[in-house]
Amino acid sequence: MPSRKPSFPSKSSIDRESFMLGMITAFAECLAGEAKKLAFSPPFYPEDYKCLREEAERICQEQGIFLWHERNADLPAKKRLQWLVLFKFPEVLDEYKKLRQEGFNPALHFEKFMALLSYGSVWGKKADKVVPAMREKRPVLDTVARILLKPGDWPIQSGARRKVKSQ
């Protein structure tokens, strides 16, 4: 896949496109494992979308989740940022869209979106009483292994155990 560079070069040594796709991968894994209901990609400029779209869609497909492009037409054009909304279940996107229709934008009213983003749930009241359960197990491909490892190196296959001699 030919790399398309984001809208401007970063002043840091960190590659912006890789950074954004890394965050998308991490959040996609959280969503696939149902540790979060909803996640946002990092914010990006409208012209960055074309360099993120294809790989972000692939990551989400591999993780068995979905994405929706938030264009933020309600933000000032000169400072408009966009992001991808990542989710596993369609009704969660419906909840997000309902908040947006009520006039709330995460960039301006973040607190309205905290529950959907699963923020505060680990230390929430009676969190120690929660019994972990998956609503739906979907087959996923390991995005991290695809990008970082040689084919066949993940998952690690258990081999025959060697007997260790005692001295």
Image: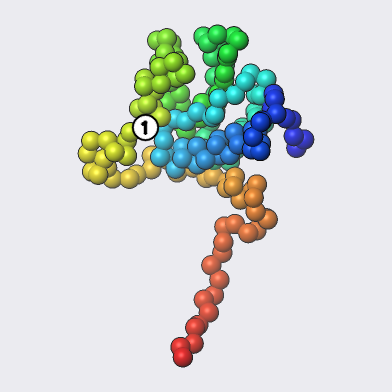
- The residue lying at 77 percent from left, 35 percent from top is 2
Occupied quadrant, residue 10: top right
- The residue lying at 44 percent from left, 15 percent from top is 108
Q: Is residue 34 above or below residue 40?
A: below
Coordinates of residue 146 in the picture (x, y in percent): 64, 48
Farthest residue to the front: give it: 11
Q: Name the residue under label 1.
A: 119
Q: In this view, does 145 lie above or below 47?
A: below
From this viewpoint, is residue 97 visible? no
From this viewpoint, is residue 16 visible? yes
Coordinates of residue 151 in the picture (x, y in percent): 68, 55
Coordinates of residue 87 in the picture (x, y in percent): 48, 30
Element at badge 1?
loop
Farthest residue to the bottom: give it: 167
Coordinates of residue 44 in the picture (x, y in percent): 59, 24
| Amino acid at pointer 1 | Tyr
- The residue lying at 51 percent from left, 9 percent from top is 74
Q: State left or right for residue 18 relative to residue 112.
A: right
Q: In this view, does 98 lie above or below 123?
A: above
Q: Which of 19 and 161 is in front in this view?
A: 19
**Mark 1: few/some/many CA within 10 Å (<14, 14-19, 20+):** some
Give the position of the N terminus as an image quadrant: top right
